[in-house]
Image (tube, rainbow, N blue to C red):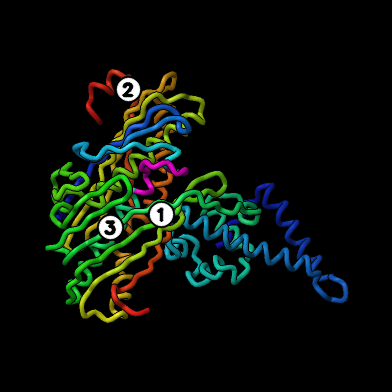
Amino acid sequence: LCSPHASPDVTTHLTHWQATDKLRSVGKDGQQEPTLSAARAEELVHIARRLRELRHDRGLRLADLAALTGTSEAHLYRLEQGERWPSLPALLTLAHVYGIAPATLLGPTVTPRLMARHRGRAQWEGEERTGSGVMLNHSVRLRYDGSSRLSSLDGRVAYDGSDEVGSSPEELIGMALAGCFSMSLAQQLGAAGFSPDRIETAGEVRLGLSGDDIGIKEIHLMCDAVVAGISTARFEEIAQITKRSCVVARALVAVPVTLEAQLVTESEVLTREGV
Amino acid sequence: VPIRIRRRATASWHGNEANGSGRIAVGSGAIDIAYSLRSRVGDEAQTNPEELIGAAISGCYVMSLASALDESGYEPREVTAVATVNLEESDGRFSVTRIGLDVTADVPGVEEKTFYRLADMTRVSCPIARALAGTDITLEARLAGAVR
């Protein structure tokens, strides 16, 4: 369970940790200083929160983390709820599994700031096989039903107001990921000092149905980009990182995403008619 | 033989993240909507990927719940779901931290207890919810006409 890999950070923090323990035990008249115990309670909350955030961020279920760490789900749950202090070996193991320096589990956390709420709405009438529904938000209104969802035909989509049926939730997921990836790649390229001119990404959602089980098996992204002054290798590296790190990809963590990304010239984009 | 269905969508982005803008389209291009950083974290009335996620999961949810009710011997008249997708920033990074589903259903003859059980089961079992394992999905469900 315990494979401590000491970095300078760990040592520093361990020293601090022991020091605080000592301070507490030698408090005047055997009483804990109120400020100190308040600080400890706050640290426990921090650790629990960091643990929750990390697992959430990695897209792991408690069961997955239990398998990776050799710790019971119940114990991990208590750690994430701040009901127990993690032991030092447990802390080091968790840091190892998450690939971070153990000290970052103990450091101050940044309170998440709610940036935006986005809404989608759907209505379904009747039973699954014979009924039909509509998915809408302020810019899209789509009708769909069982056959439009399982049809292998592509692109039968109806606009607002039309009675034509033909979309699927999977198609919207494809839009969401392609949209997020393109924007995120612009950001990543910008951060690396390049100025992207045009990024075009197609997302293909592959839905598998075996027996009664229907599920998204894979999403394939095909990206063409016009970016001046970047090498192919550097571009591919940044694109692969974006594929894993963009907001929607992290939310869709249960689905394998594959990516083909290539640099093209502006005229190539215009003649390709999409990707 | 497992059935495989492929859905295709396209997005294009012009310029950098802060000042650029993009379009998201499906298949034939019958849907083709603009988006930008402002429509994503600001209040500009264009679309954004998170909203599409909301439409996708609500669309998947209502269909799956209709199916679950049907299989349990009920005939749902109407199931409506509103999905609220929370995009939050922490440590300089944005994440979809939670998706809230607000569900109303008109199902003759179903007991509340059975309905809630099926509604919660669908929350974790519908295909889009399973794909979105990186975020928490919460549910508020009620039967139309039920006294609360």
Name the residue tied to disc 2.
A264
Type of residue at label 3? Ala
Q: Nearer the viewer, mark 3 or mark 1?
A: 3
Work out which quarter of the rendered image holds the N terminus of chain A and state it: bottom right
| Amino acid type at image mark 1 | Val
**Residue at the image position 44 percent from the left and 18 percent from the top:** A229
User: What residue is at 61 percent from the left and 62 percent from the top?
Assistant: A89
Q: Position of residue A64 (x, y in %)?
A: 43, 61
Tell me which chain the residue with mark 2 is part of.
A
Q: Amino acid at mark 2?
A: Val
Query: What label does residue B115 carry, if any?
Result: none
Query: Is there CB contact under 8 Å for labels 3 and 1?
Result: no
Q: Are marks 3 and 2 on the same chain?
A: yes
Q: CA distance from mark 3 to mark 2?
A: 39 Å
Label 3: which residue?
Answer: A122
Q: Disc 3 and disc 1: Cα gap in Å?
A: 14 Å
Figure quadrant of residue A87 = bottom right
The residue mark sitting in front, 3 or 2, is 3
Q: Secondary structure at mark 1?
A: strand
Horizontal relation, residue B35 to residue A10: left or right: left
Q: Which residues are magenta?
A: B40-51
Seen in the image, is A234 located left or right of residue A112?
left
Which residue matches tag 1? B85
The chain under label 3 reads A
Cα distance, mark 2 to mark 1? 35 Å
The foreground one among B17 and A143 is: A143
Q: Work out which residue is located at the far right of the displayed protein and give it.
A: A29
Which mark is in front, 2 or 1? 1
